[in-house]
C-alpha cells in the first residue's frame, strides 16, 4: 500500500465511499443485469469525461505555473477543442443512455 499523507480517517472514508454504493444497490435490486446497466453510465464518465477534464484542467494549471503544457506526446488530437468535444460527447452519451434506461424500465 502506498504511503497516505492524510489522516487514516480520510483513507477509510474514501474506501467506504467506493464500497457502500454497490452494496446498497445490491440490497435494493436483485437483478444483476439492471445493476450493470446503470453502472455502465459510470464507465462512460470514466472513459470519456474524466480524462478530458483532467487534460483541460492540468493544461490550465501548467499555464498558471508557467510550465510548458506541450509534451512529446502532444498533437492534433490533444488540442483543447478536442478535449472539450470528448467531454461533451461523454456527457451526451451518459444522458442518452440514462434516459433510455429510465424510459425502457
Image (cartoon, rainbow, N blue to C red):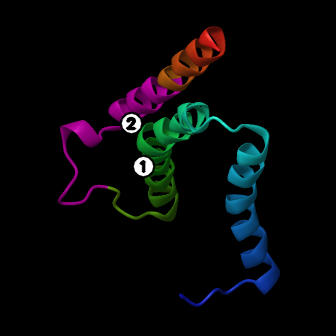
Residue displayed at 54% across by 31% down: 37
With 58 as the anchor, is 86 left or right in this view? left
Could you say which quadrant of the image residue 63 lies in?
A: bottom left
36 sits left or right of 30 in the view: left
Q: Which mark is residue 98?
A: none
Please name whichever residue, 84 or 23, is drawn nearer the observer in this view of the structure: 23
Front residue (pair 82, 38): 38
Which residue matches tag 1? 55
Residue 51's place in the image compared with 11, above or below, is above
* Residue 7 visible here: no
Q: Nearer the viewer, residue 17 or 71?
A: 17
Residue appearing at x 63%, y 9% in the figure:
103
Task: Tell me, yes or no, whether the highlighted magenta stretch contains residue 88.
Answer: yes
Q: Position of residue 1 (x, y in %)?
A: 54, 88
Can residue 20 be seen from the camera position used here?
Answer: yes
Q: Quadrant of the C terminus?
A: top right
Q: Nearer the viewer, residue 35 or 12?
A: 35
Query: Which residues make up the magenta segment?
Result: 70-91
Q: Image point 28% across, 42% down: which residue?
A: 78
Q: Report helix, strand or loop for mark 2.
A: helix
Q: Residue furthest front?
A: 30
> Between marks 1 and 2, how big is the CA–CA gap?
7 Å
In the image, residue 93 above or below residue 53 = above
x, y percent for residue 24: 78, 49
Q: Residues within 10 Å of mark 2 (few under 14, many from 20)?
A: many
Q: How many marks?
A: 2
Q: Residue at x 34, y 61 (%)?
A: 68
Q: Is residue 93 magenta?
A: no
Residue 10 lies, in percent from the top left, at 77, 75
Farthest residue, direction top: 103
Secondary structure mostly seen in magenta is: helix
Disc 2 target residue: 83
Amino acid at each position: 500500500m502506498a504511503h497516505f499523507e492524510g489522516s487514516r480517517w480520510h483513507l477509510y472514508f474514501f474506501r467506504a465511499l467506493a464500497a457502500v454504493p454497490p452494496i446498497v444497490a445490491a440490497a435494493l435490486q436483485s437483478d444483476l443485469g439492471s445493476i450493470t446497466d446503470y453502472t455502465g453510465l459510470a464507465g462512460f464518465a470514466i472513459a470519456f469525461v474524466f480524462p478530458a477534464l483532467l487534460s483541460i484542467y492540468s493544461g490550465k494549471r501548467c499555464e498558471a505555473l508557467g510550465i510548458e503544457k506541450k509534451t512529446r506526446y502532444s498533437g492534433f488530437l490533444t488540442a483543447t477543442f478536442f478535449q472539450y468535444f470528448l467531454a461533451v460527447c461523454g456527457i451526451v452519451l451518459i444522458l442518452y443512455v440514462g434516459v433510455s434506461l429510465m424510459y425502457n424500465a
